[in-house]
Image: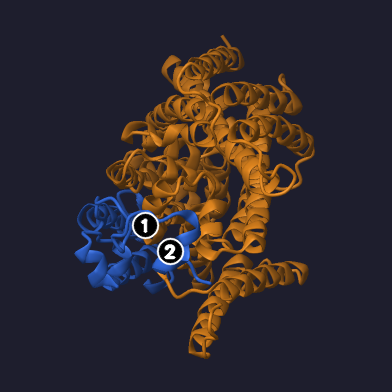
Amino acid sequence: MSLTLGAAYGVGLYLLVLIGLGYATRRRGRQTGLGDFYLAGRDLGVFVLVLTLYATQYSGNTLLGYPGEAFQIGYAWVMSVGFMMAIVVVYLTFAPRLQRIARSRAFVTPGDWIAFRFGSPRLTLAANVLLVVAIANYLLAQLVAMGHVTEGLSGGAVPYWAGVVLLTLVIGIYETIGGMRAVALTDCVQGIMLLAGLSGLLLAVVPTPAHLAEVTAAIAAEAPEKVAVPPWSVARNWFSTILLIGFSAAVYPHAIQRIYAARSVATLKRALSVMVFLPLVTTGVMFLVGVLAIAELPAGGDPDQVIPSLLTAWSGRSLLLYCLSVIVITAVVAAIMSTADSVLLSLSSILAKDVLGQTLLRGASEAQLTRVGKRLSWLVMAVLVVLALAPRTTLWGLTEIRMEILAQVAPLFVLGVAWRRLTTPAVVTGLAAGCLTYGGLLLAGQPEVWNIHAGVIALGANVACCVALTRLLSRAPVPHAA
Amino acid sequence: MRRVIEEAGLVEPRSRPWIWLVYVLLFGASVPWYLPAGPPVLWFGLPHWVVISLCASLGVAVFTAYVIKRYWSEADGEPDGAPSPPRGAAHRDGDAGP
């Protein structure tokens, strides 16, 4: 049996399981209230929380984009382990207090915190617009990955567009049926598939020290810059990436909503204690696979096709490698879909509750908003599928754009929680300064300055405004409140 | 502020500056800016700077697990120990800015 046929059986079976799980969750909970539909009744336990955070955080970018980056830049891509850990470290600055406040005030979206903390509808709307733009971009990246993986692994038999449409349709079905419960439950299956796939990859590449030494020597002979100690310019970019990913991925709306959805403080603590180790076995493995691909594949190929090409090559070598390849293919699909469903759910909750619920549908009941949210999910999917059919950049390119936008919202959570004196005018000015700086640098053709991402420089301007204005305003005489 | 938090039984990592200093050191060690340029020595088949970076990252993970266990209180309620006020009263306890 060809790898294409085996993978089709594996993925087909997996998709049926997902729809079945979605249907099963329909019987649990009323699914009519916002907290019930979008946060699974705020009752996620440790096991489900870890796997849903894991499956959501690690996506098609991790399994397809990251090996491609290692293939392109070499060993310096070991930075992916550190920057994924930085996300959990940034959580420590705000998650403990945010979770307590979110539970006591029944927050559903990230905008609920911003509205509560800063009391400014305009600021909440501006932050929501940035969040929506950023995560819509993220969802787009997942749809592009769906197309790449189906086209690449089927050797072109399943066209790019068919992969995008079919997988998006399945996500839409189980998400509309079961909301966050369906997403979290399918994330568990997807997280387990992801771990199985990574184990499969490790077994397939068998990275013994002797084998690694041979590969390193071969790469050093062909491309010494991919093995040598990185120059100062790469180190600067490495630090910048740690800051960028750490601050921006920590404020992913779907990740914030999982903080809200944790059953208790103890649940969240245990989940994050496990999460911080997972980059070692996830991005660490993908880094290794990407490096090994340098020695196996011809230079200059499409970085997003590294994994599909490797699996096709490995599957012909033995029955064991064939089976492992089928597992990895299913895991790749699982990783993409688990992120896409979470982002889609988050996107529909923001649009329904924070945008329509505050404007056209002001005063609507939770049941009405939930129904509108389900319909919005399908509308968003339709628009993004059309955009995904003509991708214009690599997966990592899409990642960087959304991260730099998200980073501008990070001070609203990190500083907003940690610094009680932080004022709303300072935050509004900081957000505007950050967005203008980022937009200005991009328009000037400077996505990086001195190897530091424009988004990080903009974040610096954003934070500087927050701090300077808060200190300045706190020194000014306070007029009597009415 | 830290005293108030601790009296309420609510310890948080953000209130301990030394924790963030350790993170700066660990992340600083994970980026090989301090190593001289040139061909690498191989450790376990990998360039030595890659192994150093992975060890520093493992240090970040172990330290984070310790910080979560030791410095993140599981007590319920808000840092000022006040019961949950109604939404409109958010500013009274200093949570909100304006």
Residues marked 2 and 1 touching at CB (< 8 Å): yes
Label 2 to label 1, Cα distance in Å?
Answer: 7 Å
Q: Is residue A228 visible?
A: no
How does the figure colour the protein chain or chains? by chain
Q: Could you tell me the amino acid type at mark 1?
A: Arg
Quarter of the picture holding the N terminus of chain B: bottom left
The chain holding disc 2 is A
Q: Nearer the viewer, residue A160 or A181?
A: A181
Q: Is residue A260 above or below residue A178?
A: below
Q: Look at the numbered disc 2 and give the secondary structure of its residue.
A: helix
Task: Give coordinates of residue A277: x percent, y percent.
Answer: 33, 46
Q: In the rendered image, what is the letter of the chain coloured orange? A: A
Q: Nearer the viewer, residue A330 or A387?
A: A387
The image shows a total of numbered marks equal to 2
Q: Could you tell me the amino acid type at mark 2?
A: Val
Task: Give coordinates of residue A3: x percent, y percent.
Answer: 57, 17
Q: Residues within 10 Å of mark 2 (few under 14, many from 20)?
A: many
The chain holding disc 1 is A
In this picture, residue A370 sits left or right of residue A79: right
Residue extending farthest to the front is A482
Q: Is residue A464 visible?
A: yes
Q: In the rendered image, what is the letter of the chain coloured blue? A: B
| Residue in the image at 46% along x and 35% along y | A55
In this picture, residue A31 sits left or right of residue B84: right
N-term-proximal mark, 2 vs 1? 1
Q: Look at the numbered disc 1 and give the secondary structure of its residue.
A: helix
Numbered mark located on residue A417 in the image: 2
| Residue in the image at 38% along x and 73% along y | B34
Q: Is residue A230 above or below residue A312?
A: below
Residue located beneath label 1 in the image? A97
